[in-house]
């Protein structure tokens, strides 16, 4: 058969960042407001440090202000909450992101729910989850927002398509399902208790995999011609046994790409698919939050 076409998330994300940067520049020219993002990290998890440094660099490249607050892992919940309160009150900061995971002695939900919902650029606050569920404007979690933008760019109108979302987390699966429902898809949410995943997945026109299980979705789970969005980021041992023995790793998605690419119509690669869209959507959310803070409608 023919090979699926690759969905170029990296390229689409670069275009989105350019559009957001240009819109932010116009906002500053017209209203004197520079969008500002504060990123808070507690502790010294190396992966989290890299994510946070990346977010800061991308934010500055887009012409926005970026503040990083690096706190020791001995920080108390009360200290973290008082930093959040200060950032909520800071008119130069339009987006607040607390890097997860937090140390075990801090209640992450309490911290996330202390962020002003209108500055909650991760979209994890219960108020933003509620807004999404009832169709009010709000801040939408970046990863599912990025998936939705890719799907609309690739397929246009999604009305009437059957979308199967694998995974029901609050940060990916559930908001993904809400966004697809808002696009008039018929949505099925699957999870670890779902019966007969392979045949359910085979009924999907759009299959979004967000399970965190390396290469779980096999080629024969996919309807020929379907659009496959692979959210997974999983580290597995290198293919080369010598490198693997030395601790070498590679990144794979939740979909067995080599099998899927022979069946699907379109598919996101890992890396280079959904990943780059997440940070682009963080910038888009920060820009939108800055606009709304002064009562201006964000450019689309
Ligand atoms: P979670 O672990 O929070 O959720 C995983 C979901 O998958 C759960 O709903 C779980 O079901 C379900 N699941 C797990 N195992 C199975 C199985 N064998 N069969 C069916 N369903 C299963 O993960 P996240 O939602 O946070 O992340 C999902 C993936 O996306 C991860 O690989 C993560 O690294 C990646 N990710 C990528 C991002 C990006 O920027 N591209 C951003 C965020 C995440 P149940 O609820 O029943 O336990």
Image (spheres, helix red, strand yellow):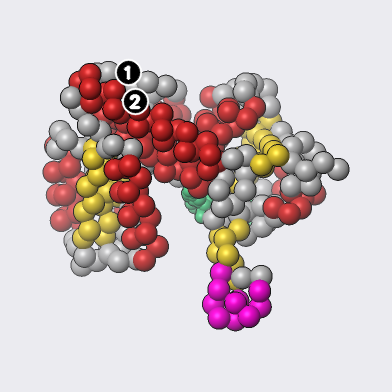
- The vertical placement of 127 against 101, above or below, is above
Q: Which image quadrant: the N terminus? A: top right
Toward the viewer: 140 or 198? 140
Where does residue 203 sit, x and y in percent of width and height?
76, 37
Look at mark 1 in the image and give the residue it sits on: 297
In percent of the image, x 74 and y 48: which residue is there?
260
Among numbered discs 2 and 1, the one appearing first in the sequence = 2
Look at mark 2 in the image and give the residue it sits on: 23
Q: Secondary structure at mark 2?
A: helix
Where does residue 188 sit, x and y in percent of width and height?
64, 36
Q: Nearer the viewer, mark 2 or mark 1?
A: 2
Q: Is residue 198 left or right of residue 212?
A: right
Toward the viewer: 82 or 235? 235
Query: Which range of residues does the magenta coloring cover?
Result: 240-249
Label 2 beta carbon less than 8 Å to ligand 1: no
> What distance separates the C-alpha of mark 2 from that of mark 1?
11 Å
Q: Residue 242: say if magenta.
A: yes
Q: Quadrant of residue 187?
A: top right
In percent of the image, x 60 and y 81: which residue is there?
245
Toward the viewer: 255 or 27? 27
Q: State whether residue 165 appears in this view.
A: no
Q: Secondary structure at mark 1?
A: loop
Q: Which image quadrant: the C terminus? A: top left
């Amino acid at each position: 058969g023919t090979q699926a076409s690759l969905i170029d998330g990296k390229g689409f994300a670069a275009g989105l960042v350019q559009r957001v940067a240009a819109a932010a520049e116009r906002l500053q020219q017209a209203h004197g407001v520079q969008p500002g993002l504060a990123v808070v990290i507690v502790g010294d998890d190396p992966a989290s440090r890299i994510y946070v440094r990346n977010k800061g660099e991308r934010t500055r490249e887009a012409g926005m202000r970026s503040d990083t607050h690096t706190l020791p892992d001995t920080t108390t919940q009360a200290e973290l909450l008082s930093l959040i309160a200060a950032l909520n009150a800071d008119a130069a900061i339009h987006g607040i992101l607390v890097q997860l995971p937090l140390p075990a002695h801090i209640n992450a939900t309490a911290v996330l729910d202390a962020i002003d919902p209108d500055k909650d650029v991760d979209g994890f606050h219960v108020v933003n989850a509620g807004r999404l569920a009832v169709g009010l404007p709000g801040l939408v979690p970046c990863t599912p927002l990025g998936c939705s933008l890719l799907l609309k760019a690739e397929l246009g109108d999604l009305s009437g398509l059957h979308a199967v979302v694998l995974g029901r987390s609050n940060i990916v699966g559930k908001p993904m399902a809400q966004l697809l429902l808002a696009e008039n898809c018929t949505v099925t949410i699957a999870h670890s208790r779902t019966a007969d995943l392979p045949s359910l997945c085979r009924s999907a026109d759009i299959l979004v995999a967000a399970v965190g299980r390396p290469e779980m979705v096999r080629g024969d789970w996919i309807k020929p011609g379907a659009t496959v969005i692979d959210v997974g980021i999983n580290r597995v041992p290198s293919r080369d046994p010598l490198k693997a023995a030395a601790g070498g790793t590679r990144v794979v998605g939740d979909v067995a790409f080599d099998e899927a690419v022979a069946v699907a119509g379109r598919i996101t690669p890992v890396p280079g698919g959904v990943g780059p869209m997440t940070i682009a959507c963080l910038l888009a959310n920060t820009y939108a939050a800055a606009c709304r803070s002064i009562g201006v409608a964000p450019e689309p």
